Amino acid sequence: MISFDRRVCAMPTDNAPILELRSISKRFGGLTALKDVSLKVARGEICGVIGPNGAGKSTLFSIIAGSVSPSSGSVIYTGRDVTRLPMYRRTRMGLARTFQLAHTFESMTVEDNILVGAEDHSHLNLVSAMTHLFQRSEAGARARVREIMGLVGVSDIASQEASHLTFGQQRMVATGRALASDPRLLLLDEPAAGLSSRDIDALVAAIRGARAAGTTVLLVEHNMDLIMRLCDHIVVMHLGEKIGDGRPEDVRQSERVVEAYLGA
């Protein structure tokens, strides 16, 4: 089992949700991307957000991460109102995000790409972040990175430069780098896109391993087999509104969800 840093992943003893959105709306000019969306994510669960293209999922993620501000409503994270906090402040509070397009440092090896995530470098440039890593326990950091590489299935390409990776491998490296930051809440934006069946199995193991270590996971995903296999809780979006919220079996049986997204 991966040994995440318990300073960050230690779970509070209360039953308050780790994340709560209260009546979130977002307007871009005359376009309403989100309308009065409220939801709660319990500590330690794996929650999936699904919906057709244009449903508002990516906008919702951006508001949670702090890269986009809501037009109205509140974001409560670990019991604190973070609605107006910038993204880097949320990152320091243990909120990590991956993106639909995998971002890697192409001239660096797979191991070093993930190693960058092991340092809280939200206020540092890349060179400074790497310097800080070597100044602290490099051996300890690399040991943890090796665990993460095994978890996401990239151990056999640890010394390979990121520029030579397939798209699917890049996504797994990006997921590993996010895990290396020891997040309390991990946001995964379409993590299975472009992955083979073998890579998806590794992704499932990585997400479950992160949850077992104390990380709450919130993911946007179109792969319904993955969502139903992995998630404890599913939120369904359609045209900027929440139309479903509950256990996978309840969502699957919702007539409104079936009509709008899953298909008869």
Image (cartoon, grey):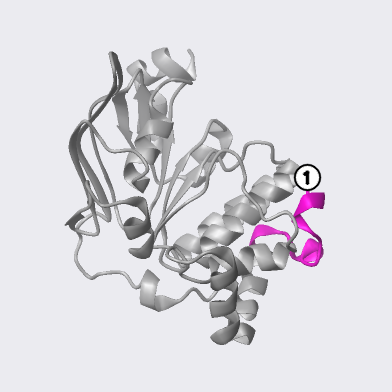
- Estimate the x, y position of residue 31 in percent, counting from the top left: 31, 15
Name the residue located 38 percent from the left edge and 53 percent from the top edge: 45
Q: Nearer the viewer, residue 52 or 64?
A: 64
Q: Nearer the viewer, residue 225 or 137?
A: 137
SS of the residue at dot 1? Answer: loop
Residue 14: in sight, yes or no?
yes
Residue 260 to residue 171: above or below = above
Name the residue located 63 percent from the left edge and 72 percent from the top edge: 145
Report if residue 164 lies within the magenta region. yes
User: The magenta stretch spans which residues?
Assistant: 151-165
Question: How many numbered marks, from 0 up?
Answer: 1
Q: Dot 1 surroundings within 10 Å: few (below 14), some, or many (20 or more)?
A: few
Q: Is residue 178 left or right of residue 252?
A: right
Residue 164 to residue 69: above or below = below
- Estimate the x, y position of residue 154 in percent, counting from the top left: 73, 60
Residue 234: in sight, yes or no?
no
Q: Is residue 26 left or right of residue 216?
A: left
Look at mark 1 in the image and give the residue it sits on.
Answer: 166
Report if residue 210 lies within the magenta region. no
Q: Nearer the viewer, residue 98 or 193?
A: 98
Report which quarter residue 238 is drawn in.
top left
Q: Is residue 123 left or right of residue 246?
A: right
* Amino acid type for the residue under numbered disc 1: Thr
- Estimate the x, y position of residue 218 in percent, counting from the top left: 41, 47
Name the residue located 44 percent from the left edge and 63 percent from the top edge: 122
Q: Nearer the viewer, residue 136 or 182?
A: 136
Report which quarter residue 91 is drawn in.
bottom left
- Estimate the x, y position of residue 38 in percent, counting from the top left: 22, 35
Q: Is residue 2 left or right of residue 47?
A: right
The N terminus is located in which quarter? bottom right
